Image (spheres, helix red, strand yellow):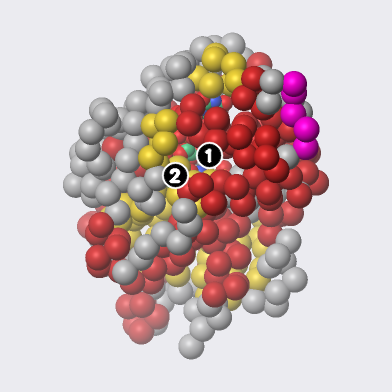
Amino acid sequence: MSKTVLVTGGAGFIGSAVCRFLIGNTDARVICLDLLTYAGDRRSLRDVEECERFTFVKADIGDVEAVKHLLADKAPDVIMHLAAESHVDRSISGAAPFIETNIVGTFRLLETVRAYWLELPVEKKCEFRFLHVSTDEVYGTLGDEGLFSETTPYSPNSPYSASKAASDHLANAWYHTYGLPVVISNCSNNYGPYHFPEKLIPRIITTALEHGDLPVYGKGQNVRDWLHVDDHAAALWLVATQGRLGEKYNIGGRNERRNLEVVEAICSILDRVGPPGPAGGYASLITYVTDRLGHDHRYAIDASKLETELGWSAKYNFDTGLEATIDWYLSNEWWWRPHKGTAEAIYQDKSI
Ligand code: NAD
Ligand code: DAU
């Protein structure tokens, strides 16, 4: 029988990819719950909005009454919890919404879900699953060598990663203490379509198209491990449905790049396929700016548990995936243009 899946944060970057994945690749009914903060956009759901298996509900994960009624009404078999404040720079300039949504909101959601789960008929109760979607940033920072594994101790450094680490601990505690069927995923940096233009890759692409300065923090030597958002969505479904309860799974595509390499790659692709750039080429726009406070040096994921246990592998290669992403931004200015002002506004605060 087809499942009913509740996706929190489904109007965000990764959540919308999850909704597209579920509608396109499964027969699940999909309920998207999203508060539509600055980062949520229903237009990101345009490919699924018309599908009769898809429903959108505007609500806060921390609104106990709203979530209680939604659970009673829709009776989900699986919950994929992605709703969060997600941007490290914003967490540095103001941590309050990160504490409120990522920690308190997740706590309230876990409690509301636990009350729902306890009342389920035995068969449905046994099959119910709650996936808590988290980040590799909970592990802190790496030197030039080594990888994060599922047993790497937590050592979060930013207000964002501390709030995600706290929510991971809550999800884990609800499994161990109450038996709520929880599984946790920790993923590296995603890229792809519908990525809010405050984050590195879409910020650089959209700013380059405006011939603006391309801000590289510090010397651009920090390393991130990039994964296409569609590869992440497929992995999340596998972990949600087949991951072992009480376990965590790291997700990453083994695509480490220094930030400067990423920015230079975007510039050279735009020189080739984009509209005419400035006289010296798009790379002439690169500008080194003050570093992020507490900037983690390097993230890199060992995804072998996910690969060997659940048979997942990434389909995208970073170089072709990046070019496809740039093509998407070139063709979809209607989507990113209205977000550009909001995305840049936080950077006017010079304390970042
Ligand atoms: P995003 O900022 O693009 O989307 C977050 C979504 O959550 C938005 O649609 C927003 O409206 C919604 N939301 C925020 N607060 C809410 C609340 N209180 N109630 C209901 N909805 C709310 O974020 P994203 O990049 O898609 O990340 C999704 C999840 O994946 C987050 O939990 C994030 O920590 C995690 N993650 C992200 C990455 C990445 O590279 N972007 C990597 C690993 C893990
Ligand atoms: O690792 C997973 C995490 O990846 C997710 O949990 C977060 O939600 C997601 O936002 C992302 O965090 P990062 O801080 O790594 O992503 P961001 O795109 O903000 O920055 C990537 C790198 O680029 C980082 O080293 C900072 C740098 N940077 C970023 C911006 C926005 C710049 O040099 N210039 C910029 O303008």
Element type at mark 2: strand
The residue that disc 1 covers is 85
Q: How many marks?
A: 2
Which residues are the magenta region?
Answer: 275-279
**Nearest to the observer: residue 201 or residue 40:** 201
Residue 307 horizontal side relative to residue 337, left or right = left
Q: Real-space Cα distance between discs 1 and 2?
A: 20 Å
**Nearest to the observer: residue 69 or residue 166:** 166
Q: Amino acid at mark 2?
A: Trp
Element type at mark 1: loop
Q: Residues within 10 Å of mark 1 (few under 14, many from 20)?
A: many
Residue that lies at the very extreme toward the bottom in this rendered image? 1
Residue 324: percent from the left, percent from the top? 61, 52
Rendered residue at 53%/39% (across/down): 85
Q: Which mark, by number, is residue 8?
A: none
- Height in image: 6 above or below 85? below
Majority secondary structure of magenta residues: loop
Residue 95: percent from the left, percent from the top? 49, 27
Q: Nearer the viewer, mark 1 or mark 2?
A: 2
| Residue 164 in view here | no
Rendered residue at 64%/20% (across/down): 284
**Marked residue nearer the N-terminal end (1 or 2):** 1
- Height in image: 207 above or below 128? above
The residue that disc 2 covers is 226
| Residue 250 in view here | yes
Q: Quadrant of residue 350?
A: top right
Rendered residue at 46%/22% (across/down): 220
Residue 174: percent from the left, percent from the top? 30, 55
